[in-house]
Every structure is written in C-alpha cells, then in structure tokens.
Image (cartoon, rainbow, N blue to C red):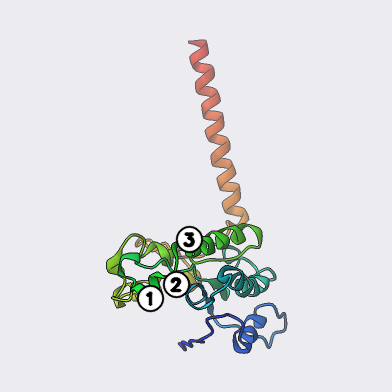
C-alpha cells in the first residue's frame, strides 16, 4: 500500500487537480487512487484576512465539481473513493491566544453547514465520522487544540480504510464494523423482501378480520 500526502491547504494546486481529473475520466488508462481524501478550512480561517469563507468555498467547490461527475460513495462498492473531510472543530479551550483570534467558531460552523448543504445539492461525499471521533472531547487533541493525539489519528485512519476495504469482502463483517459501502440488494433479495412484506400485510388483515368476526 502506498500512502501519499499532498500539502495543498488552498485545494487549488496543479497536482491535486490532476488527481481529481482522474476520477472523471472514462479511459481505461485512468487509474485513480483507491481513496482520495481532500480537506481544508482552518488554514483559510487563520490566514485569509478578508472573507475567508468565500475563499474556502471556492476551494471546496473545485472538489465538488469533480464529485458531481462521479458516482456517490453509496453507489460504488468495489470502486475508488473521492471524499471530503469535514472542517475540524478544534478543542476551543486549548487554542492559544493567537489561534483564538483567527480561528473562529462561527466560521468553522459556517463551513461545515455549507458542506452539509452540498452533500444534498451536489452529491458531495463528506466523511463526517472524523468529527464524531472528537466531538466534545478536548483530550482527543494535543496541546495545540487543532491536531489529534496519535490514538485518535489511528482510529480515523482505520475508519477510512475500512470504508474502502470492507466493500471488497464477499461477506459483510459481523464484528461491529460499520464503515462499509453496502451493496444494493439483488433481484432475489428484492423478491424475498417484497414477499416477506406481503405476508406480513396479509397476516395483519387476517388477524383483523378474525377479531371483527369474533
């Protein structure tokens, strides 16, 4: 397995764009990475002095534009994933005075709200589990209040890999693992599901008639 980190806090570099373009090509020669996770937000909040939200939206929209032409995560088991990370919600009580004056709760909330809207409007795939791992847990962050401690970082990595790798399994894991792209039922499963539903309805009707006649 090869892991590559592309430092592009503005999400507008040529290298990232070239990787994104692979996901919308239909040529057989195009081989996208198994998982491409893109994320930004705190950098904009900290370093963009005027209208950081607008600058960030332009960066995110670039990734969303590529997602629009790809299948959503739920529709592509056994396939490669293009995902957005939610904007990290820091441990506000740990932020230094410098960070407190530049990384603002309202801006972070606005960014994540925008991502939620785009999930519905443009089919954006956001890996919200990342923020759930640290929600309300200041101990999940190191002294900076921004970066996760190693144990939490490991859990995030496991969840991301599970999402991609579990879909390759012939059978779903039954050990509590929930990070999986579940395949749609086949026609036999649909027939069984509809048959079960029909029998349940008939049973309710028969029971109801029996009570009326008794």
| Left or right placement of residue 72 versus residue 163 in this view | right
Q: How many marks?
A: 3
**At 43% from the left edge and 64% from the top edge, which residue is drawn?**
129
**At 48% from the left edge and 61% from the top edge, which residue is drawn?**
106
| Residue 139 seen in the current view | yes
Res 13 quadrant in image: bottom right
Task: State which mark lies toward you, 3 or 2.
Answer: 2
Q: Which residue is mark 3?
A: 106
Rendered-image quadrant of the N terminus? bottom left
Q: Which residue is mark 1?
A: 98
- Residue 6's disc number: none
Marks 3 and 2 sit apart, C-alpha to C-alpha, by 11 Å
On the image, the x and y values in percent for residue 141 come to 31, 72
Mark 1–mark 3 contact, CB under 8 Å?
Answer: no
As helix, strand or loop, the secondary structure at mark 2 comes to loop
Mark 2–mark 1 contact, CB under 8 Å?
Answer: yes
| Left or right placement of residue 109 versus residue 98 in this view | right
**At 50% from the left edge and 64% from the top edge, which residue is drawn?**
107
Q: Which residue is mark 2?
A: 102
Q: Residue furthest top?
A: 214
On the image, the x and y values in percent for residue 79 come to 58, 74
Could you say which is closer to the camera, residue 55 or residue 128? Answer: 55
């Amino acid at each position: 397995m090869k892991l590559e980190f592309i430092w592009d806090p503005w999400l507008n570099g040529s290298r990232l764009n070239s990787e994104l373009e692979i996901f919308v090509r239909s040529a057989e020669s195009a081989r996208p990475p198994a998982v491409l996770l893109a994320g930004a937000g705190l950098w904009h909040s900290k370093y963009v002095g005027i209208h950081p939200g607008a600058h960030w939206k332009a960066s995110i929209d670039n990734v969303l534009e590529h997602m629009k032409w790809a299948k959503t995560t739920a529709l592509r088991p056994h396939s490669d994933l293009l995902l957005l990370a939610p904007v990290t919600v820091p441990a506000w009580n740990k932020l230094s005075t410098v960070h407190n004056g530049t990384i603002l709760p309202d801006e972070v909330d606005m960014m994540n709200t925008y991502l939620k809207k785009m999930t519905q409007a443009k089919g954006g795939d956001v890996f919200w589990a990342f923020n759930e791992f640290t929600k309300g847990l200041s101990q999940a962050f190191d002294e900076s209040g921004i970066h996760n401690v190693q144990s939490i970082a490991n859990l995030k990595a496991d969840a991301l890999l599970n999402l991609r790798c579990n879909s390759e399994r012939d059978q779903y894991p039954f050990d509590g693992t929930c990070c999986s792209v579940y395949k749609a039922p086949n026609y036999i499963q649909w027939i069984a599901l509809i048959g079960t539903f029909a029998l349940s309805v008939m049973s309710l009707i028969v029971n109801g008639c029996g009570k009326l006649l008794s």
